[in-house]
Amino acid sequence: MTGTLIAPVIPSLAAAAAAGQPGRAPSAARMLPLAVPPALSRPPALPRDVVYGLAHVDRSGRVAGRTVIGALGWRGGDRLTLTAEAGVVVIRRDPAGLVTLPPRSCVPIPAALRHRCGLLPGDPVLLTAVPAEDTLTAYSLAVVDQALRALIPFPAREGGDR
């Protein structure tokens, strides 16, 4: 199909105003509101004695976090004890532990503990390492969300409820 091209018709702001249509200059575009977190008495400082990281539970129930686990100085072959409840898995190095840390620095979480915590393959977890206590903790993001909402309420939308 061949033919002549027709130039686009773009009315000017003056023509729109003359026709009784409200016109807006591009610079007068309405800005979207930004969410402002609630004011705290003072901004919290990130503790220096804790190392944080995000990881996912793989299909075999392992959680890999080389940086976080590396901060503890754990090595492949170290024995671990794991305890869990309500979306939180606490891992401690323990010579009598039943779980062995593999050489790849990924912590295998036994199926019984994953089920107790509601952790499924692909679920993200917040890892926290406290080297002074030789402890690694994996928090499901559902638990992190509950803690955040309890501590700092999410800001409401402008002009109404959430």
Image (cartoon, rainbow, N blue to C red):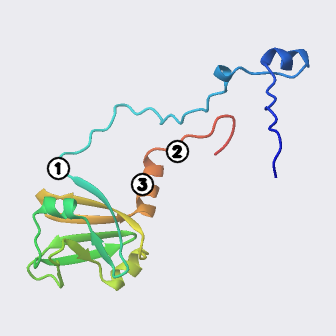
Sequence-wise, the earlier of marks 2 and 3 is 3
Q: Residue at x 41, y 76 (%)?
A: 121
The circle drawn on residue 147 is: 3
**Where does residue 151 sit, x and y in percent of width and height?**
43, 47
Q: Residues within 10 Å of mark 2 (few under 14, many from 20)?
A: some
Q: Amino acid at mark 1?
A: Asp
Disc 2 from disc 3: Cα separation: 12 Å
Q: Residue at x 66, y 27 (%)?
A: 30
Indicate which label's residue lies in the foreground, 3 or 1: 1
Q: Marks 2 and 3: CB-CB under 8 Å?
A: no
Q: Which residue is mark 2?
A: 154
Q: Residue at x 79, y 21 (%)?
A: 23
Helix, strand or loop for disc 2 = loop
Between 115 and 7, the one lying in front of the other is 7
Q: Residues within 10 Å of mark 1 (few under 14, many from 20)?
A: few
The circle drawn on residue 49 is: 1
